[in-house]
């Protein structure tokens, strides 16, 4: 029992700070990287991603190794193994994380898919199709000539438009290729 309780304590109790645990990489400020991870997690939370999955995804996206074990995630984020488990399960269900292992090893690694954003948008596209169907029913229920029915019909038109355009946007993005900017194929450089 004591062992189980000890293993679920956050690493903060072991005397490490978040900045010391975040992989800073060569020439990076660990505290700045830790702040960025938390800022990215906050932005994801504003989009509706729960707090722990948002933090775990931000850590996965920002690690140079491209993959982390559950223990590494728990240490980096100073969270319990149970919190990591729930977060990665959520992220895998929505396509924002993948689990992989090496032959002969029982250790699992988690990573953000290389094409994570177009996968997430693809999932949203399926949701929009569902929303469109439900809204279309609402127009009939409310009456197309009522103010409420007109608002719902406008929502249907919006989602139909976005669902039509989205596959073209994703196709165009894939044609650009990784590491290119959309303004003419220059490498992405936030400083220009």
Image (tube, rainbow, N blue to C red):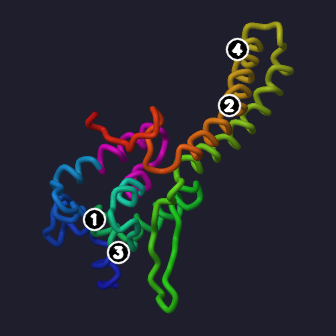
Q: Which residue is mark 3?
A: 71
- Disc 1 residue crowd, few under 14, some 14–19, many 20+, Cα 10 Å: many
Q: CA distance from mark 2 to mark 3?
A: 41 Å
Q: CA distance from mark 3 to mark 4?
A: 49 Å
Query: Does residue 2 appear left or right of residue 146 in this picture?
Result: left
Q: Residue at x 47, y 38 (%)?
A: 47
The boundaries of the magenta stretch are 37-56
Say which mark, if any, is on residue 76: 1
Say which mark, if any, is on residue 165: 2
Tell me the element at label 1. helix
Q: Which residue is mark 4?
A: 151
Tell me the element at label 2. helix
Q: CA distance from mark 2 to mark 4?
A: 21 Å
Q: CA distance from mark 1 to mark 2?
A: 39 Å
Looking at the image, residue 151 lies above or below residue 116: above
Tell me the element at label 3. helix
- The location of residue 150, given as percent across then percent down, is 75, 11
Q: Earlier in the sequence, mark 2 or mark 3?
A: 3
Which is nearer the eye, 23 or 89? 23
Contact check, label 3 and label 1, Cβ < 8 Å: no
Instruction: Assign the magenta stretch its main secondary structure.
Output: helix
**Which tag is nearer the camera, tag 2 or tag 3?**
2
Looking at the image, residue 25 lies above or below residue 183: below
């Amino acid at each position: 029992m004591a062992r189980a309780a000890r293993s679920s304590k956050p690493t903060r109790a072991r005397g490490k700070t978040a900045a010391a645990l975040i992989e800073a990489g060569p020439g990076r400020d660990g505290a700045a990287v830790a702040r960025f991870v938390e800022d990215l997690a906050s932005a994801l939370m504003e989009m509706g991603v729960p707090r722990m999955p948002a933090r775990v995804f931000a850590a996965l996206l920002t690690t140079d190794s491209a993959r982390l074990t559950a223990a590494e995630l728990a240490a980096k984020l100073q969270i319990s193994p149970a919190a990591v488990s729930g977060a990665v399960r959520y992220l895998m269900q929505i396509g924002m994380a993948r689990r992989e292992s090496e032959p002969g090893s029982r250790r699992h690694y988690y990573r953000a898919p290389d094409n994570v954003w177009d996968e997430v948008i693809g999932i949203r596209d399926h949701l929009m199709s569902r929303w469109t169907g439900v809204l279309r029913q609402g127009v009939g229920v409310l009456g197309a000539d009522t103010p409420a029915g007109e608002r719902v019909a406008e929502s249907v038109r919006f989602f139909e438009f976005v669902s039509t355009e989205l596959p073209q946007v994703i196709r165009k993005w894939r044609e650009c290729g990784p590491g290119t900017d959309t303004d003419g194929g220059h490498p992405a450089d936030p400083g220009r």
